[in-house]
Image: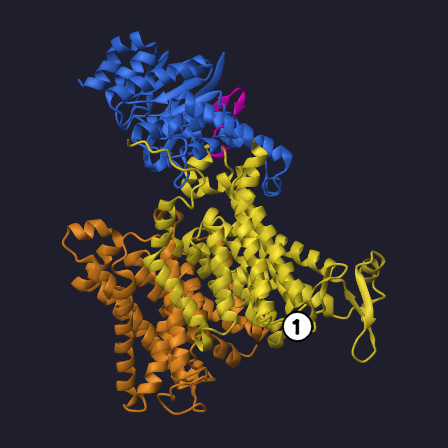
Amino acid sequence: MAMSQNFGKNLVFLPIVAAVILIQLLTAWTGSVYYLTQLTMSAYYSLLIVGLCVLMGYAGQISLGHAGFFAIGGYLSAALTTRNLSPYSGQLPVRLLDSLGCLHAGQDLYGDPLLVVTPWVACIIAILVALAIAFILGIPVLKLKGHYLAMATLGFGIIIYRIALASSYFGEADGISGVPGFALLPGLLVSGDKAYRVSNYYIAWTVLLLAMLLLRHLINSRVGRALRAIHGSPEAADAMGVDTARFKLKTFMLSAVFSALAGVLLTHYNGGIGPSEASVMKSVRYVAIVAVGGMANIWGALAMGMVLNFLSLRGFFGTYDDAVFGLILITIMLFAPNGILSLQVRGLWRQRGLFRRKKPAVKEA
Amino acid sequence: MTSELFIQYLMAGITYGSIYAIVAIGFNIIYNTTGIINFAQGEFVMLGGMLSITFLQYLPLPLAILLAVVVTMGIGAAIEMLFIRWLVNPGILRMIIITIGISILIREAALHVWGANVRSLPYFFGNEISTIAIFGARVSPQVLWVVGTCSLMVVALNIFFQATSIGREMRACAANRIAAVLCGIDTRNMVTLSFVLSAGIGALAGAVMSPITYTQYDNGTGLAIKGFTVAILGGLGNSLGAVAGGLLLGIIEAFSVSVVPLAFQDAIAIAILLVILFVRPHGLFGSSAMAGLKEF
Amino acid sequence: MTILQVQGLSKRFGGLQAVDGVSFPLRQGTIKAVIGPNGAGKTTLFNLIAGMLTPTAGEITYQGKAIQGLPPFRVAAQGIARTFQNIKMFAGMTALENVMVGRHVQSKAGFLASMLRTSGCRAEERAIHKKSLELLDFLGIADCAETLATNLAFGQQRAVEMARALALEPTLLLLDEPAAGLNIYETAEIARLIVRIRDLGVTVLLVEHDMSLVMDISDEIVVLSFGRKIAEDIPTVIQRDPEVIKVYLGE
């Protein structure tokens, strides 16, 4: 019975998978394959956004610094896979990495020897660093509430931005370009090369939907219930034996990993990363999208993440891009603090039973 | 370090410090009456500078600044009436997001009106190279304008809050909103007034600092972070603490120039902010018992 | 056998001595009530035991372990569950989900296991679900399982809170004014319920205003006045205690 129940719950993914395939086929038929580029990028941004959604909506912790984790992932993997280690090839750490097969030798444009870290290793290092920073930062920061938490995470984001902007290792204002493709499996390359456009679209969506599946499981589990309990009544959760500090911290780390992974993959896809990815405006934008999606609603976050990022990347908002996100933030918070779906539409769906798993037994009669 | 250099750093620190203090006091005024941290506080300062520069084309300097301050006050009032006044019991998270949204809108509007160029008001007396000697160090006379104006504002605000009936009503509203309502104080107007006041002092500071620090559409965020750091240093809601905190941060920043690379200057304030938040969230001068009563 | 021993427990708030050197034992499998006029320090005493407050002095020994000053979630992990005077439901969760949170300390799936939905995790989840439904049934509110807890009637919320506390499988249950806000019928029902819980082998410590409830169900009563214990005995003796009568009825 449980098996069928589980299967039934995950049926939610079917229409989405169908839509993903349909959109790809549509772009192929209509000769507008170029849309796939922005759809792929939006999927990676949405990966960050659904992670932030769990942190904000379920654990109830605001973060105005998640672009920082994205940048940690992106910048580290970019720097490690492009910065030449051959001048240091005699030194112990480099020799050690090399003997473990973590390095890739090649030639640069001028035929000089180039020794860089392989994408897989760089990816793992980037994610571990993000995890470690989230852990170290999270312990003191998550003790704060409200304005203090917002400002502290904002401060973290700005520090990451400053580091990216000020250090030559990270390319200062130019960022890092020439990042190689990332072969997830032989023949499955994360790369912005036109030849890989379709496969990358599917890679991005596979990663995103896998992430959704994991988060869905998480939310409907002991951990998810504990998180929602913390949100619902911190004292009662505490009295039920929930170690609130620990759960907040772990959620913070989880969302940091999602952000860093998004940064790693998008950087390989774009072939580079610049400091604007670490800017405060990006962090604010992610918060805006989570808010529009309805805070504690990963599907809303996914939908809004796709729509808003796609429109923004297509240049739909023109020079008013940031202003649009500002306006969205204000409007949503003023008129629909529970997200766009909380407006009439959702009420309608509820009535028709589309959002219910079980039809309510009619008791009035 | 020579004594001239020392005094020069010190004066620079005091100049910036007074501006941070004004931004922090702006935070405090609104926080005290509403419990909201207005993330758009830095934008008032930017607006003060930008509007003065624009009005200067048509008006003499004092009038241009006056008009800029009045217009910014109007914007402050409009923000409160449009976005804050009619919300029933909004959560802190909601208010944070709304004021962030407002700050983005103001900043983007400024970008479209004034462009991304750095602008500045002319020096009130003399020009970039005119200096006066203080204890053997040469500093710009504008520094005196900044420090003088900021000090006057602090004194005037103190008199306002202590000696006028409106000021006392605002303090009553800060101390206990419900009790203030029961005493017949119109707390909603007090909230509007707090936005007007903090917009006004921010704008005036923005105008007098413009010749030295320049004005750009995105000045606000950095100032807001520093102002907030100072407000926390001095204990949120404590304006004399804010003055001390402002001077402290300004001087630390000024002297750190010789140690910390310029690109990381902003990081100093943030590092101080993070350390203070973790170690003494009630501020250097506040008591933890008092802080416990506040809703963060 | 003594399951909980309170020894010389004191709590001072600034100039106010809210609890002053209170000592009493709690025998396993009994119902003990703490009563006293308003401001006697009942709630403070309760919060000291539940870990919400740290005592200024004194010891709380639970099954041989000192637990004073432990945070509430660690106290809960020892097998001590509690309810709240002004009910604290988890907003946005159904009655069933509220009770399922109560299984927290009796289950262990972490972030990774939950995300991957391992077979162990699935089995645990089924067990949690089953046990929680049983508890709702035990309290006679099984048909409310899928209703948002905050939409339930007050009495039902109280029952959900009780089920949630029982889901911990506590050896000691702390009840903070369980009859507050209930009418006499509901109070009588709660009284029967508390006795049934005691008969399951759970030790109960309750703080209560409602004298009839306390006298009916308690095995022993502790009376506090101005933070001090002035009497401790079985209900029939307490009812005749001149000092208790003086405290309650005045001179």
Q: Position of residue A172 (x, y in %)?
A: 62, 74
Residue C136 location, quadrant: top left
Q: Is residue C137 above or below residue B151?
A: above
Of the 4 image quadrants, the one containing the C terminus of chain C is top left
Colour of chain B in the image: orange
**Depth check, front residue: C25 or A341:** A341
Q: Residue at x 21, y 16 (%)?
A: C246
Examine the rendering and report whether any part of residue A139 can be seen: no
Q: Position of residue A188 (x, y in %)?
A: 72, 61
Q: Residue at x 70, y 56 (%)?
A: A124
**Depth check, front residue: A304 or B113:** A304
Examine the rendering and report whether any part of residue A7 can be seen: yes
Q: Is C12 in the magenta? A: no
**Depth check, front residue: B284 or C161:** C161
Colour of chain C in the image: blue
Q: Which residue is mark 1?
A: A176
Q: Is residue B91 left or right of residue B213?
A: left
Dot 1 falls on a residue whose secondary structure is strand
Per the rendered image, the range of residues in magenta is C59-73
Q: Position of residue A52 (x, y in %)?
A: 51, 54
Q: Is residue C165 above or below residue A139?
A: above
**Depth check, front residue: A95 or A180:** A180
Most distant residue in the front direction: A29
Q: Position of residue A4 (x, y in %)?
A: 57, 36
Q: Which chain is yellow?
A: A
